[in-house]
Amino acid sequence: MTTTITLSPIAYVKNMRNDMSDDHWGNVLSEITIVDELPEECIEGIEAYSHLEIIYHFNKADESKTMKGAAHPRENKAWPRVGIFAQRKKDRPNHLGATIVKLLSRKGRTLIVSQLDADDGTPVLDIKPVVKEFLPQEEVKQPAWVSQLMKDYWK
């Protein structure tokens, strides 16, 4: 059974990135501005949190490149072929991204954040405060190739 889900952006990202590249996100500061259709009070109290989880849509992804099966991450044959749900590639079914960001400040309807790997104009679908009790209570495990892939991501 297929269910249709319709979502509307709750905010948009504004920053200096516009190239959908995979690395060097470390110095990017972003503004997340809540849409006018939502009241400003929807982010009331958010300043009490240090980090937020941002769920967004890869709106610039090429639909013809959507991956549903398995492939080498970044087409690198040195890394194992893994399924789309075993990697964080933008070319996934639904084109959803999720990143935990650092909340730097709030100015009215706008949140200033760092560590957001979304291009300028990206639609935000949800914002959740990071609550430590929802984070893993044990050590996070990942394959070695992921650390290789991520070595320049936040530089």
Image: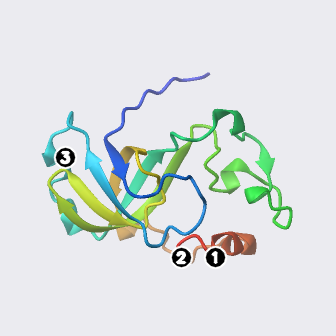
Q: CA distance from mark 3 to mark 1?
A: 36 Å
The picture places residue 54, in percent across and down from the top left corner, at 40, 54
Disc assigned to residue 22: none
In front of the other: label 3 or label 1? 1
Determine contact: label 1, label 2, CB under 8 Å. Answer: yes
Location of residue 94 with respect to 27 vertically, above or below: above
- Tell me which amino acid carries mark 1: Lys
Whether residue 145 sits left or right of residue 121 in the image: it is: right
- Tell me which amino acid carries mark 3: Cys
Per the image, label 2 sits on a secondary structure element best described as loop
Q: Nearer the N terminus, badge 3 or badge 1?
A: 3
The picture places residue 151, in percent across and down from the top left corner, at 63, 76
Location of residue 121 with respect to 48 vertically, above or below: above
- Disc 2 target residue: 155
Whether residue 145 sits left or right of residue 48 in the image: it is: right
Location of residue 125 with respect to 133 vertically, above or below: above
- Disc 1 target residue: 151
- Disc 3 target residue: 42
Q: How many residues crowd mark 1 within 10 Å: few (<14), some (14–19), many (20+)? A: few
